[in-house]
Image (cartoon, rainbow, N blue to C red):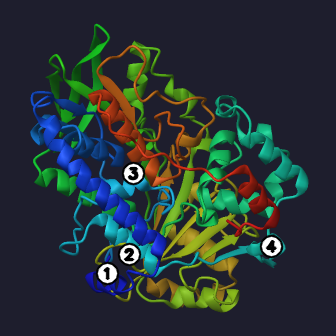
Amino acid sequence: MKKNDLKKLLAIGAAVTAAAAVTAVAVTIYNKNKKKAFENEIAASNKNVYIAGGGLSALASALYLIRDCGLKPSNVHVFINQTPKIGDSENGYICRRGKIISTRNSMNLFELLSGVNSTDIPDLTVCEEILNIYRSNPLSRPITFIDEDKNVIDISKIKLDKEHRKIIMQLMQSDSAKLKSIPMFETFDSEFFQTPFWKLFSSAYGYSQGDSTYEFINCLAHFDNMMSGTIPDDFDRYEEIVMPLKSHLEKIGADINSGCEVTDIDFEDDNVSAVHYTDNGIRKTVYLNDGDLCILPTDDMSYGESFGSFNEPAPKLLSTPYMLWKKLSEKNHVFKDPSLFFSELDENMSEEFTITLSNSLLPELIDKVTCGALGNDGIIVLDNSNWKFTVCAVPSTHFKNTKEDIRIMWGSATHFDRDGERCGKPMTECSGAEILYELVSCFNLDEAWDDIRESVINVIPCHRRFDHSFVAPGGSKLEIIPIGIGNMAVSGDFAEYENGTVFSQEYAVSTARSAAYTLMKTKEKVFKATPFSCRKIKKFLKNSLMSL
């Protein structure tokens, strides 16, 4: 986020009363917690906690342990291996789908970030910065759906038929434990997957027919501005949330170890006894004393991505980022077999691309042929394309310090395994140039190719090997407190947590908070997400996609 942009956003600060109320509540709770932290300090003074991974849930649990549970910052040890690449204006950016932040159901996230300072504006917290961004853009992003016959469909009029609505409402009241192991294709008939409703949903969330029925139903129950989905929006989650949180922890003295990968965990007498890790390639081991604790964040378990370039496709990945989980499952059955979630088949995969441009020529040309569909950071779903493209204009505020003339577009494909209409091969085998030409051809802009090519800084294809693994129909996930292990907790996407949806940023923070509080036996409470009533969801499904 550029400093000038942020200052403008601050001037609009009072635009949304509800968001202001969230800020006030979050800050009040933060101040109360600050007073309680001192009371816990003496009891926890010699306890060490080892957090065996990175990501938001790892950093959130570290801050909760220090702030609310009284641990010395130097006694909280975080091992961070992965740092996402985001690119730059000279070599091209890399956008990713981001977890959703709902102003209605993100109290744990907002409360956490109300004590973390912005890296851009002094005396402004990350919580206030995010809410100011949302206040400046209170309206939903425009979405254009072009069907297989090249007709533009008004999404405000898209709704499900009575039979499919009935199935969804029955599922809402079914046993969630059973739904967790049932894929979508076993729940719905083939006609459902041909509806504009499903095509929009799968484009917005990168959802497939092989993903969990439970996660689909749970998503419907929790989001208001649902159809914008996880498509890149006003800010990059890593830059705006994770980086300031990591910086805050380092400033207060937490032991943050970058370039460290936890490779194994030993157990003795039903407790974690040792953590093995590599420190920039050097093998090391830390042994736990009585009273020490360990948290296993699972945010990075599905992290496996490779990048191509304008002239090269993204290479296929052979890595297994869930290897630590696999080792633990072989030692103790309480850690379920990760193969239930991580499939070697294409159903776990996603293919995306980011276009970085030196000017606005391409977005303007697309706007001309689509009647302004990309304007106001719009989203276009091209159901008439072989790959079933979804493409959007990425807001100028998404990355910090983006040069003024730079334009960024992001796209994905739900049928990346099919041959493209122009390139004649699957998207997985295409370079950035080939993907761009396929997209340009979908809008009948072939004659402008030379001019478009001149404006391109880079087109970076991205192959994500296990992108859908956290919504796979693998049944229940890992218990936050594994049964029979006295000094360990689990957080993140693969932690079992009934309050909320894994598509939200709140999920990582909620599981982290629950893990920290339960391990430390504190009386603090975790805010719970409130799903919509069945009556409201029924109305939403009957009337239109925009009725929530």
**Which residue does the numbered mark 4 point to in the structure image?**
157
Q: Is residue 460 visible?
A: yes
**Which residue does the numbered mark 3 point to in the structure image?**
108
Give SS at disc 3. Answer: helix
The one of 18 and 185 positioned closer to us in this rendering:
18
Mark found first going from the N terminus, 1 or 3: 1
Q: Residue at x 64, y 88 (%)?
A: 372
Q: Nearer the viewer, mark 2 or mark 1?
A: 2
361 sits left or right of 402 in the view:
right
**CA neighbours of label 4 inside 10 A, class few (<14), some (14 to 19), many (20+):** few
Mark found first going from the N terminus, 1 or 4: 1
Give SS at disc 2. Answer: helix
Mark found first going from the N terminus, 4 or 3: 3
Position of 191 relative to 398 (above/below): above
For the residues labelled 1 and 4, the Cα–Cα distance comes to: 35 Å
Q: Amino acid at mark 4?
A: Lys
Residue 288 lies, in percent from the top left, at 17, 20
The reply to whether the C-beta atoms of the residues labelled 2 and 1 are less than 8 Å apart is yes
Give SS at disc 1. Answer: helix
For the residues labelled 2 and 3, the Cα–Cα distance comes to: 18 Å
For the residues labelled 1 and 3, the Cα–Cα distance comes to: 24 Å
Q: Residue at x 35, y 28 (%)?
A: 489
Q: Amino acid at mark 2?
A: Asn
Labelled disc at residue 6: 1
Q: Quadrant of the N terminus?
A: bottom left
Labelled disc at residue 132: 2
Mark found first going from the N terminus, 4 or 2: 2
Q: Residue at x 29, y 24 (%)?
A: 264
